[in-house]
Image (tube, rainbow, N blue to C red):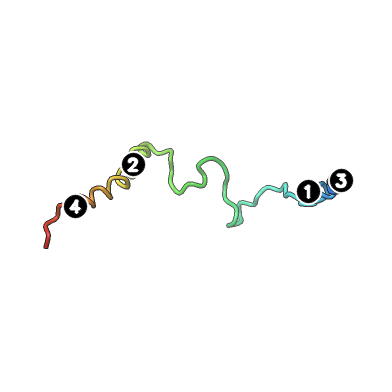
């Protein structure tokens, strides 16, 4: 009972997939809407610099420990 609708739907699915018209042309780089692709091309910083990881971990440590430092500062500051 369920086999007949499945058999009838199969040709319809293949025609939809073949009709989607995927573009095989390469992107025009003169257009402002296409950017170069590849690893690390979408990052807003350069990971290949010499001291990147030192700066990265300093930034991460500052972001992690700042709330604790602020809490200690607020706890120990003189009451006015």
Picture coordinates of residue 47, whole percent (x, y) = 43, 40
- To which residue does mark 3 refer? 1
Q: Residues within 10 Å of mark 4 (few under 14, many from 20)?
A: few
Query: Considering the image in quadrants, where does the C terminus appear?
Result: bottom left
- To which residue does mark 1 refer? 17
Task: Answer with left or right where residue 8 lies relative to residue 20.
Answer: right
Q: Residues within 10 Å of mark 3 (few under 14, many from 20)?
A: few
Disc 4 secondary structure class: helix
Which label number is shown at residue 8? Answer: none
Q: Residue at x 23, y 48 (%)?
A: 69
View extreme (bottom): residue: 80
Q: Are marks 1 and 4 in contact (CB under 8 Å)?
A: no
Compare marks 2 and 3 and give the one earlier in the sequence.
Answer: 3
Task: Answer with left or right where residue 40 lies relative to residue 80.
Answer: right
Compare marks 1 and 4 and give the one earlier in the sequence.
Answer: 1
- To which residue does mark 2 refer? 55
Compare marks 1 and 3 and give the one earlier in the sequence.
Answer: 3
Q: Residue at x 65, y 50 (%)?
A: 27
Disc 1 secondary structure class: helix
Task: Answer with left or right where residue 24 lies relative to residue 4.
Answer: left
Give me the C-alpha separation between circle 1 and circle 3: 26 Å
- To which residue does mark 4 refer? 73
Compare marks 4 and 3 and give the one earlier in the sequence.
Answer: 3
Give me the C-alpha separation between circle 2 and circle 3: 65 Å
């Amino acid at each position: 009972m369920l086999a007949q609708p499945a058999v009838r739907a199969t040709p319809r699915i293949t025609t939809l997939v073949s009709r989607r018209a995927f573009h095989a042309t390469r992107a025009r780089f003169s257009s402002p809407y296409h950017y170069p692709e590849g690893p690390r091309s979408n990052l807003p910083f350069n990971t290949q610099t010499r001291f990147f990881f030192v700066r990265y971990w300093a930034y991460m440590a500052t972001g992690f420990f700042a709330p604790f430092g602020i809490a200690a500062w607020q706890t120990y500051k003189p009451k006015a």
